[in-house]
Image (cartoon, helix red, strand yellow):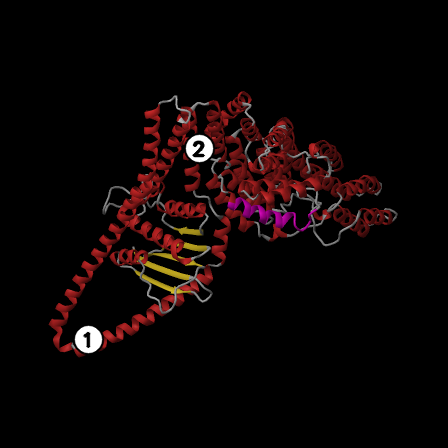
């Protein structure tokens, strides 16, 4: 089961990964071992040989295995069971991590015999056996060694190994969701108070990636919290082979990166998948490009790049993987390689070659790799490309039972897209339309889903102090202007002090006029928005409907016998789908439905996701607070009615419109590449901050465009304040404060 390949990389602690700069050629490695094997087996020599094997394993793990096969018998003769334990456990984990389960099983059994009478080491071997059998898919063996291990660890008071056993026992029963959840929760409880955080990290990581795998947002939230735990000193050190007598989760941060690649691919968010993939590659492969796991990572990055449409880059990763596997291409043992190769071949118009590649991955069975989509779907797509429709329909029918739990994911999107291709190829226009509409619906959902941009979130938090300082600077400048203005008002107040009654009347009139201006500004802002929507309805929707009408009229006039009738009807269908999408977007502009359905926080994050999907601007959205504001059961009624979040529907709508206008203003005018958007709920106020890296606002330029004028009108109506100014490093910073 290669499905959890990257989970093994983290949990099994692949001991051939680089830990220092010493690299050996094959000749140097054999010469070094020839020297050391004639030395007496002392503690210092044992440690030196362990270091030698580990460094050699960075580039040639087979030589390390040869050394182990000679050295283990030599160490056995000394009677030092601790050293034998270290060698056997390291050897077994290395074999296991590279899918050599049968060899690993033999080594673990030798380690079990060697550890008899030593409770700690015995429990550690049982943990290793439980994990290996869970990865191997041998549930009966998992249960056997998990049960023995739990009794032994509990009797010895070994809470760390007991926690590991609960975790890996749970992983062996992924289909039993109830048991999976119970076991992982118990594992976390057992590990929570331990000073060493390896068991806690392992339990929480598996809870996120396995138990929460059908709830991407919850999974991502847990993974974010784990990024902090991954920095714990008990996880971040890189022990040598002989220091590894427990299940250290050495590759904590890269393991989180790998899972975030998976989640983003599942959400069809290829931009973020690529960012995390590159972080993962830099952390694991770049320091040691010839490590045993390097060809697997290169294959996965090739897939991510192909999904992004960066086919030249995908070819480069495929070439690296092919060279590193070091076997004939037909003998490569990893399905992701062939799936990526098929996507590249398809892009080049080589449909038969693409089908052959997809078929190679399909024949490997359920080994899904990092992308979490079955190779069956790629194979079915290849069959449709080459007009093998009956076989494609059979494959898609096999996948249908998986859809209910994963409809609104990349699996659902590509399934219905492939099904639409099949129906179109069969000439079933009604079936084609239904499947295409479903694929569009899923795509819309994915585009509007909170894709959780963890990289941007992390960067935003790192930069938060700088932004706070900029906000303070803007506020100080605003306060200085306010003090100057107050001084002027005091002076004129003294001058006019003898006309108190007239002043009071004058102020009252000014306030009244101000309220009128504010109301008029708000009305004008709404009117401008209505005109924009009306223009789009007339220009875009009207034009598309005219085109659809023209095609239908022509078909009705000439009849279905006309040679171009089917093409005209298909074109009309596509035009109407486009109209439906546009109308949905306009409906969202008229009333932000996401607020009613999901709440204000989700609506803002959806807005950012929609802009990011367009590719015009990268928006980092950070929304703090607003729990229960809007959404089903949240805001109730209209006007002044207040919901669970304590805000009226009208207030949340105004707040959303301001955020929307500010973001659109950056898109239209700032010429920016990135923008940080923060909406924060404080105890007595709400702040909105928009920070872009665009051309900025000149000091002598009046900041009064139509978009900002609309925002100013809403802010004034809500009795808030706004500060807009250029940043020293370039770009513009806008800060809005609204009273609650």
Dot 1: what SS? helix
CA gap between label 2 and label 1 equals: 68 Å
Within 10 Å of the Cα at label 2, are there few (<14), some (14-19), or many (20+) other Cα atoms?
A: many
In front: 207, or 420? 420
Quadrant in the rendering for residue 4: top right
Examine the structure image and report whether residue 278 is included in the region drawn in magenta. Answer: yes
Quick check: 154 above or below 398?
Answer: below
Main SS class of the magenta portion in the image: helix
Instruction: Kindly tell me whether residue 353 is visible in this rendering.
Output: yes
Residue 352: percent from left, percent from top? 60, 29
- In the rendered view, does 212 fall on the left or right side of 345? left
Residue at which label 1 appears:
493
Q: Earlier in the sequence, mark 2 or mark 1?
A: 2
Examine the structure image and report whether residue 302 is included in the region drawn in magenta. Answer: no
- In the rendered view, does 475 fall on the left or right side of 256? left
Mark whose residue sits in front, 2 or 1: 2
Pointer 2 with pointer 1, Cβ within 8 A: no
Disc number placed over residue 439 in the picture, else none: 2
In front: 100, or 169? 100
Residue 217: percent from left, percent from top? 46, 41
- The quarter of the picture where the N terminus appears is top right
Residue 503: percent from left, percent from top? 14, 71
Quick check: 285 above or below 558?
Answer: below
**Highlighted range, magenta:** 271-289
């Amino acid at each position: 089961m290669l499905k959890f390949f990257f989970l093994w990389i983290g949990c099994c602690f692949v001991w051939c990964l680089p830990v220092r700069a010493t690299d050996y050629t094959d000749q140097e490695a054999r010469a070094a071992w020839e020297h050391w094997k004639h030395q007496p087996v002392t503690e210092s020599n044992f440690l030196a040989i362990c270091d030698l094997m580990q460094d050699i394993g960075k580039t040639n793990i087979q030589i390390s295995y040869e050394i182990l096969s000679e050295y283990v018998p030599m160490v056995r003769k000394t009677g030092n069971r601790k050293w034998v334990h270290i060698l056997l456990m390291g050897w077994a984990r290395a074999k296991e991590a590279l899918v050599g389960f049968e060899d690993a099983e033999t080594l673990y059994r030798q380690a079990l015999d060697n550890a008899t009478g030593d409770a700690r080491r015995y429990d550690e071997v049982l943990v290793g056996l439980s994990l290996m059998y869970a990865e191997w898919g041998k549930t009966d063996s998992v249960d056997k060694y998990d049960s023995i291990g739990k009794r032994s660890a509990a009797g010895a008071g070994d809470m760390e190994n007991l926690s590991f056993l609960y975790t890996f026992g749970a992983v062996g029963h992924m289909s039993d969701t109830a048991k999976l959840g119970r076991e992982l929760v118990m594992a976390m409880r057992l590990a929570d108070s331990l000073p060493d955080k390896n068991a806690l990290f392992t339990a929480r990581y598996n809870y996120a990636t396995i138990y929460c795998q059908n709830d991407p947002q919850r999974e991502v939230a847990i993974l974010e919290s784990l990024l902090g735990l991954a920095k714990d000193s008990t996880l971040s050190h890189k022990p040598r082979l002989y220091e590894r007598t427990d299940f250290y989760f050495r590759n904590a941060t890269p393991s989180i990166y790998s899972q975030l690649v998976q989640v983003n691919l599942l959400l069809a968010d290829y931009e973020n998948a690529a960012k995390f993939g590159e972080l993962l590659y830099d952390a694991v492969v770049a320091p040691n490009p010839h490590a045993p796991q390097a060809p697997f990572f290169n294959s996965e990055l090739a897939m991510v790049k192909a999904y992004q449409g960066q086919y030249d880059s995908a070819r480069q990763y495929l070439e690296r993987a092919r060279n590193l596997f070091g076997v004939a291409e037909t003998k490569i043992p990893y399905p992701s390689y062939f799936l990526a190769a098929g996507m590249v071949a398809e892009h080049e118009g080589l449909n038969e070659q693409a089908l052959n590649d997809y078929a190679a991955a399909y024949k490997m069975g359920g080994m899904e790799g990092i992308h979490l989509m079955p190779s069956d779907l790629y194979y079915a797509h290849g069959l449709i490309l080459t007009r093998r429709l009956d076989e494609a329909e059979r494959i898609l029918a096999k996948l249908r039972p998986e859809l209910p739990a994963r409809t609104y994911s990349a699996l659902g999107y590509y399934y219905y897209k492939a099904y639409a291709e099949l129906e179109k190829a069969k000439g079933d226009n009604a079936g084609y339309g239904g499947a295409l509409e479903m694929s569009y619906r899923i795509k819309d959902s994915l585009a509007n889903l909170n894709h959780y941009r963890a990289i941007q979130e992390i960067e935003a938090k790192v930069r938060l102090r700088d932004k706070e300082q900029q906000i303070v600077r803007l506020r100080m400048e605003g306060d200085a202007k306010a003090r100057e203005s107050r001084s002027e008002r005091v002076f004129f107040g003294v001058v006019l002090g003898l006309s108190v009654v007239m002043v009071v009347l004058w102020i009252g009139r000014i306030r009244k006029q101000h309220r009128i201006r504010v109301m008029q500004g708000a009305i004008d802002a709404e009117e401008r928005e209505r005109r924009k929507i009306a223009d789009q309805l007339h220009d875009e929707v009207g034009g598309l409907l005219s085109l659809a009408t023209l095609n239908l009229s022509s078909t009705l006039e000439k009849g279905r016998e006309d040679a171009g009738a089917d093409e005209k009807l298909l074109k009309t269908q596509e035009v109407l789908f486009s109209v439906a999408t546009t109308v949905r977007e306009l409906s969202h502009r008229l009333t932000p439905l996401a607020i009613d359905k999901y709440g204000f926080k989700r609506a803002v994050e959806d807005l950012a996701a929609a802009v990011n999907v367009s590719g015009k601007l990268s928006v980092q959205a950070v929304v703090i607070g607003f729990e229960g504001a809007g959404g089903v059961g949240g805001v109730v009624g209209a006007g002044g009615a207040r919901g669970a979040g304590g805000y009226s529907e009208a207030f949340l709508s105004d707040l959303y419109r301001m955020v929307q206008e500010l973001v659109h203003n950056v898109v239209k005018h700032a010429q920016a590449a990135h923008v940080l958007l923060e909406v924060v709920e404080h105890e007595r106020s709400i702040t909105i901050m928009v920070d872009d890296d665009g051309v900025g606002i000149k000091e002598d330029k009046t900041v009064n465009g139509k978009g900002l004028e609309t925002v100013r009108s809403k802010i004034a109506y809500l009795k808030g304040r706004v500060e807009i100014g250029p940043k020293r490093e370039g770009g513009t910073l806008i800060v809005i404060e609204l009273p609650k």
